[in-house]
Image: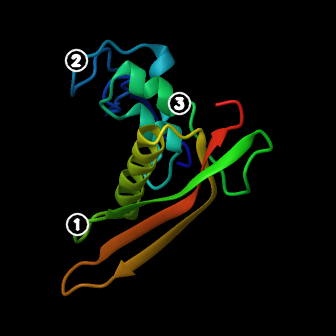
Amino acid sequence: MLKEVYRICPKCGMSNDMEANFCLKCGTKLTDADKKPLLKHSGRFIDVLAGLDISAEERAAAQQVEFLVGGLPADSIMNSPVYAEAVGNPGESIKSVTDQLVEKLYSTAVSLNLAGVANLKINTEVVPGVSERTVYMLAYGDGFIRAQE
């Protein structure tokens, strides 16, 4: 099956069966609007943000942040190079470490009052261990603010 659909809790991000009326993890009431695909080995930055336990003010600020592979937007000014890193535990999935990295990117951008990060690069190194491998990830780019800020 290419598309697995679950009821994803809007509060904690837990994937629940399609028939569930309440989240098994936090008890939040689920509706048809919570039906979403479960991406086990991939995802979107905004989905990581949705699963974070943060204040409404932090969430609103983070939702405005842009992450761009390309250059600075025309209405922006370079602020400072920024980076974030994530190191997985031995045997931890690359998706899990990527989610940690995305959380740290959002944290960095919001903490520094950035509008976003342009020229974003992500390096990944997988180091084999005695019994399991360890994933190291580094993201870096140009933090920017809007010209009118």
User: Which is more N-terminal, label 2 or label 3?
Assistant: 2
Residue 145 in the image: state x and y as whole percent: 62, 40
Assess disc 1: are there few (<14), some (14-19) or many (≥20) residues with their C-alpha within 10 Å of its C-alpha. Answer: some
Question: What is the distance, in whole Å, between disc 3 and disc 1 at their CAs?
Answer: 28 Å
Assess disc 2: are there few (<14), some (14-19) or many (≥20) residues with their C-alpha within 10 Å of its C-alpha. Answer: few
In this view of the protein, which residue sits in the foreground, 23 or 133? 133
In this view of the protein, which residue sits in the foreground, 12 or 120? 120
Q: Name the residue under label 3.
A: 63
In the image, taking residue 4 as reference, residue 10 lies left or right, namely left
Q: Name the residue under label 1.
A: 89
Q: What element carries label 3?
A: helix
User: Which is more N-terminal, label 2 or label 1?
Assistant: 2
Residue 110 in the image: state x and y as whole percent: 45, 38
Question: Which residue is at a point 35% across and 52% down the rendered structure image?
Answer: 100
Vertical position of residue 7 compared to residue 105: above or below:
above
Assess disc 3: are there few (<14), some (14-19) or many (≥20) residues with their C-alpha within 10 Å of its C-alpha. Answer: some
Q: Which mark is residue 110?
A: none
**Amino acid type, callout 2:** Gly
Q: Mark 2 points at which residue?
A: 27
Task: Give the foreground label among 3 and 1.
Answer: 3
Residue 64 in the image: state x and y as whole percent: 57, 31
